[in-house]
Amino acid sequence: MSDFKKLWKYLSRYKKSLVLVFIFNLFGAIFSFGMIAAIIPFLNILFDNTQQVHEIPETFVLTKDSLQLYLNYYMTMVIERWDKSIALVFICLFLIAITFLKDIFEYLGKYFNIPIVNGVPRDIYNTAYRKILNLPVFFFTNERKGDIMSRMSSDITIVRTSMNSFIDLIKNPLYIIVYFIGIVIISYKMTMIVFVLLPFMGIVTGKIGKSLKRSTNKTQKLQGDILVYIDETLSGLKVVKIFNGAKQMLKKFEKGSNAHYREMNRANRKSSLAHPLTDFLIVIILSIAIFSGGKLVLADDGGLSAEAFIAFVLAFTQIASPAKSFTSAFYNIKQGAAGIDRIEMIINAEAKVAEKADAKEIKSFSQSIDLNHITFGYNSERTILKDVSFSIPKGASVALVGQSGSGKTTIANLIPRFYEPQQGNITIDGISINDYKLSDLRSLIGIVTQESLLFNDTVFNNIAFGIENPDKEKVIEAAKLANAHDFIMEMENGYETNIGDQGGKISGGQRQRLCIARAIMKNPEILILDEATSALDTESERLVQEALSNLMKDRTSLVIAHRLSTIKNSDLIIVMNEGRIVESGKHEELITLNGAYKRLHDLQLI
């Protein structure tokens, strides 16, 4: 039952469509049984067993005997006025009309089910993607990208498949109930025999369903592993080739692929068992019912005519198809629930970087950014920052230097609240950044990192990213300040040129200048530069450094650099070592101290 609750959470917004699907399938089931019921008068005429009724009953009651009496009256009138062949024609026309109505209602049921089938996966996509955008950065440091891709692709595909089966969970029980009521009307004695045996079938199919859900969970996890291997291979293809790691990667991939193959075989075999198992169980139940019904027909006082017995058998065989479809739908819903379990790992993930309900607005600041006794670690085993405190006055340029792993980038990630410190706090104008609206805080900040993070889009859209209705002149101006306009104009389509996945169609220096143009376009008050020139050649570095100088004018800057030549003119240089501040001051002051900064400076001169 919990599996259906999971689905209902997403189905509930389609209540109107669900009601219509229910109503149309109910009428479809009623008219479907009417086709079987029409067999009884047809056989009565063929066997010459039609009871002659010459007077129409005074009152109509919705009972088996009343319906039979009315039917026999009209059949008697037709036979006496014309002959039996005309009566058969009437029955055939009735059968055609009732089949037409059945098909119309079944189509309408499918018609109104289509928005549900396509809407639920769309809603899950949107909800999961919205959550991905809202989740803090540290969530993705603990998760594998390939596994998240698997949850967003193959798991939602499974949910879509289960939605295709959802109409069978509405339609088939209705058909089974209507046919069941019909066979009760035909012969309650035979129906009681069937009713006693049906729970056994439900127990067997239920156990298979639980086992199938476990297998589906496992196959989807293995599918995630495969996507992780593919993602790692594509991201590190140059490393794989240069270090001759192809065999090692292939061995790893094939191991995961074979495990997925074996588990998929198990799951598919369990799923394929649904139809034959249901068929077999229904034939057993039907055989017992036929034997019992045959004895009732042969007995003089059995209360069951041969025509009714044939109609009962036909009606019961018609239950077999919806029963099998219902079983398959039940298994598919189990698989869909397993898919939702995995997707909801993302949807229900805790957003630890949360915004307060009464968060303040901030559009600008006038004094300083202050880090007060900050202690932080990505996990409990290792502390990255240890009691770090310093101030960045408005309009000042503060540089962080030190060995790799000393905590420089971590500080840069704490200011826009990508992470939360375990101890201490960061304030802007004396107010904790936790008290500000996240969107407002981040709108003040522009970041240029060592890795040029661009999108598979045009140059124009990459520079104007995040800005609604951007002005083309401003985009061009930002590109000129970033020393990017000239190489952009040399491209085939200028600003409308697509730069490929992660900007792969242009050079590293060009990518970096586009990132700087994007930051200039945003026009942030606070600028964070995280080793923005460390991966560039000399010529590219010169162009990028010029662009950065244009970007840093009249802005509050936090600069992380390995090359000390790029930060010599900073207002304050802070030297980090193993998560602590060991020195701070201007370039000349630190050289005079003859400490850690001087050692770094001398090493770079060498």
Image (cartoon, rainbow, N blue to C red):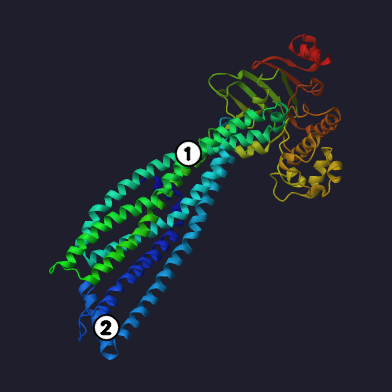
* Mark 1: few/some/many CA within 10 Å (<14, 14-19, 20+): some
Q: Nearer the viewer, residue 328 or 84?
A: 84
User: In the image, is 551 to the left or to the right of 251?
Assistant: right
User: In the image, is 183 to the left or to the right of 595?
Assistant: left
Q: Nearer the viewer, residue 388 or 554?
A: 388
Up/down of 584 relative to 201, above or below: above
For the C terminus, the image quarter is: top right
Up/down of 449 relative to 56, above or below: above
Q: Residue at x 33, y 60 (%)?
A: 319
Q: Which residue is mark 1?
A: 263
Q: Amino acid at mark 1?
A: Glu
Relative image position of residue 132 (x, y in whole percent): 57, 40
Per the model, the C-alpha gap separating discs 2 and 1 is: 61 Å
Q: Which residue is mark 2?
A: 75
Q: Amino acid at mark 2?
A: Met
Task: Determine the secondary structure under disc 2.
Answer: helix
Q: Is residue 118 visible?
A: yes
Q: Residue at x 31, y 60 (%)?
A: 177
> Which of the two discs, 2 and 1, labels the residue nearer the N terminus?
2
